Image (cartoon, coloured by chain):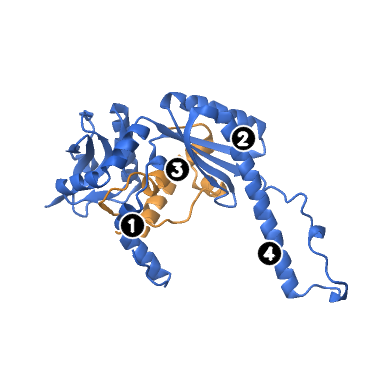
Amino acid sequence: MRAERYVYAIVGHDMRLPPDLTGFGDGQLLMVTWRELAAVTSPLAVGALRRTAEDVLHHNAVVERLQQSGRALPVRFGTIVPDDDAVVQALAVRHAELIGDLARLGDKVELGLIVLWDHLPSTEGHREDDLPPRRADSGDEPGPGTRYLRGRLAASRRDTAVREAARGIVQEVDGALGSRVLERCVSIAPTARIAIRAAFLVEPARFNACQHAIDEVRRRRPDLRFLVSGPWSPYSFVSRDAAVERSALGDSLHDISRWLTLPKTDG
Amino acid sequence: MTATMPEAREVALLELLDRVVDHGVVIAGDITISVADVDLIYLGLRVMLTSVERAEELGLCRPPVARGRG
């Protein structure tokens, strides 16, 4: 049966693979090199990838073990290329970017942080009587249009208050972490329950210090709940190549546009 | 991987899924995970949580995301 190449990580060409580390189905890990780079792969029969939680965990376990052996960039779960030549071509296409990322991220880890509201921030200072006054000749009860617009205004003010409060939390966390953080990705109020979702790129040796710094913020803010996770391989910080991602994800975007019955976009 | 609070332990797998499926290097190959696959993996991780209800209560169960072809 023909085997494709499942790709776990990008490493330096001189990395020594841990001898006891294997890929999916106990497949032998192989390095496919191009110049200073190598992709860590294992053979995988066509169609054999299982989309299961166990395989997600195994993918990540391989990446973490590789990072313990040297610099490594995590590749997205589910990345399969037809053969070694295609691996080499993939490395060549993004060579400069991958070299840069490997130097910048290969020996770093990320700390995950989710901050949850216990109670949503109030719209203090924006009371109902701040709303524009009704006209004297408008009658006792506002019409449906007025009620709708007042509702929209109130919702907008709630959203603004939530986002302002979330930005305040980001400032507090940033202040506590200080120069321990090399880079960060922050999403402000991504859902109604979550104030911020963030990833912080740090040196592994500073991970515990960052946890303690966040603990300080947690003690100051008993109105919030802080969920810290990691250390993770630096998945959130790798450079994104729009063209390559569009190529890799093109069929999915096509499917989505079809589901939404939107006109298909070019490019 | 470590976690500092019970809640964090409960959602660590969801955090992992966010990273492994939605981030990481994309090379010029095929991402073979479809929308339905992500849902299945997500469901699998949820089953593995010590307290699915707790994760849901915390509002950490995210909507499905789109990935490449399946």
As measured in the structure, the alpha-carbon distance from the residue carrying label 1 to the one carrying label 3 is 24 Å
Residue drawn 23% across and 47% down? A90
Q: Secondary structure at mark 3?
A: helix
Q: Is residue A66 left or right of residue A160?
A: left
What residue occupies the far right of the structure in this picture?
A136
Label 1 vs 4, first from the N-terminus: 4
Let me know if marks 1 and 3 both belong to one chain.
no
Chain B colour in the picture? orange
Q: Judge whether A131 appears above or below B14 on screen.
A: below
As measured in the structure, the alpha-carbon distance from the residue carrying label 1 to the one carrying label 4 is 36 Å
Tell me if mark 3 has few (under 14), some (14-19) or many (20+) residues whose alpha carbon lies within 10 angstroms of its own: some
Q: Which mark is residue A246?
A: 1
Asked if one can make out residue A60 in the rendered structure from this viewpoint, the answer is yes
Q: Amino acid at mark 4?
A: Arg
Which residue was labeled with disc 2? A172
Residue drawn 52% across and 28% down? A179
As measured in the structure, the alpha-carbon distance from the residue carrying label 4 to the one carrying label 2 is 30 Å
In percent of width and height, residue A238 lies at: 37, 41
Asked if one can make out residue A61 in the rendered structure from this viewpoint, the answer is no
Numbered disc 2: what chain? A
The one nearer the camera, A164 or A143, is: A164
In percent of width and height, residue A37 lies at: 23, 36
Which residue was labeled with disc 3? B15
Numbered disc 1: what chain? A
Numbered disc 4: what chain? A
Q: Which mark is residue A152?
A: 4
